[in-house]
Amino acid sequence: MGNHSKREVESLLQRLQERHEALAKVMRGRDATLLTDRGAPGLVVSAEDIRFAVDDVATALKEIKARLGKG
């Protein structure tokens, strides 16, 4: 078990939360003007935005692993 400063842990946690919130926002997309095949309201979600947001979350997790996972 390693010792880490509270400031470092809080910084990593804040970064992860920000990136997670950004991913959730992208996943919510925007309302589509057309209905889905089943007649339900649809969402428009940008595939490129999803990929970038997922990569950002993965990067934050890798940074946590690299900085806190040693010990």
Image (spheres, rainbow, N blue to C red):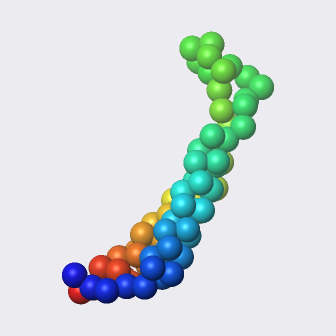
21 displayed left or right of 63:
right
Asked if 45 appears above or below 62 in the picture, the reply is: above
Q: Position of residue 50 (x, y in %)?
A: 58, 53
**Residue 37: which quarter of the image?**
top right
Name, please, the residue furthest toward the top.
39
Count all numbered tags in the image, as a single digit: 0
Q: Is residue 27 visible?
A: yes
User: Depth check: 54 or 71 in front?
Assistant: 71
Name, please, the residue furthest toward the front: 6
Rendering coords of residue 11 (x, y %): 53, 76
Residue found 67% across the figure and 41% down from its top: 29
Which image quadrant: the N terminus?
Answer: bottom left
Residue 67 drawn above or below residue 49: below
- Which image quarter holds the C terminus? bottom left
Q: Where residue 8 sits: x, y (%)? A: 48, 82
- 30 sits left or right of 14 in the view: right
- Give the camera-side residue of 37 and 53: 53
Whether residue 47 is visible here, answered yes or no, is no
Identify the residue shown where x is 64% and y is 48%.
Answer: 25
Q: Tell me which residue sits at (68%, 37%) in the image.
A: 44
State the image coordinates of residue 31 (x, y, percent, origin top left): 72, 31
**67 w.r.t. 41: above or below:** below
